[in-house]
Image (cartoon, rainbow, N blue to C red):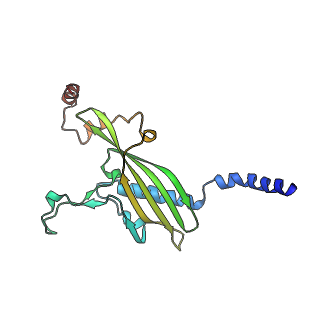
Amino acid sequence: MRFAAFVIAIFVTALPAMAQPTGDEAKVRDVIAQWYERVSHDQADAPWVLMAPGSIDGGPGYSIPADLDGGSRVLRGPWVNHELAARAVKFAYDIDALEVDPNFAKVIVWERGYFYAWAAQTTYENAASTLFLLEKQDDGRWLILAHDARSTGIPPNKVTDPMPDLHDHYYSTEGAGRDPEADAKAAKGF
């Protein structure tokens, strides 16, 4: 009986230490933050430097719009960044799951991209569920071994409520040439 109490006491005293994030967990979170910073621009800031040798990227990535592809490298248009972090007017992400062992880490991220619909005069959101697999390198760095992002429907427990108000931001940036009063009047006609 004393032995069982001793084992329970050791386990209970170890719980707070187990609940604290490890140094590796912080490093993995930092790589994820760097990823989203790098892919959040129209022209991504070299996110491949965060990828491990032999890695795979199953994210939305880049493409040339079909109407701009003239068949020649010289006649091609610009590459378009399809990452939600680059397309959204406002972007946020949550780490839903994080598992770290001495060599690998698995991270599941919920991406939220907010947009403004001028015709309806409202903010709406798109979402993606993203999986990152990371590998610890011999020098201690964590690099992305696999990245897979899938757009998805938003379940009720993930809907942003209330939505951010992007009205003023929209009309001061990409909607600067539009008339907000005329758009609001037209939206009431629906």
Q: How many marks?
A: 0
Relative to 101, 4 lies left or right: right
Identify which residue, 158 or 113, lies in the foreground. Answer: 158
Give me the residue at 31% from left, 60% from top. 61
Can you say whether 1 is above or below 116 in the image?
Answer: below
Give me the residue at 32% from left, 46% from top. 88
Relative to 31, 188 lies left or right: left
In what quadrant of the picture does the C terminus appear? top left
Relative to 1, 87 lies left or right: left
In what quadrant of the picture does the N terminus appear? bottom right
- Residue 51 coordinates in the image, percent (x, y): 41, 67
- Residue 54 coordinates in the image, percent (x, y): 41, 73
Give me the residue at 40% from left, 55% from top. 36
Give me the residue at 60% from left, 58% from top. 22
Can you say whether 127 is above or below 59 in the image?
Answer: above
Identify which residue, 115 or 171, lies in the foreground. Answer: 115
Which image quarter: residue 90? Answer: top left
User: Residue most toward the right?
Assistant: 2
User: Residue most toward the front?
Assistant: 1
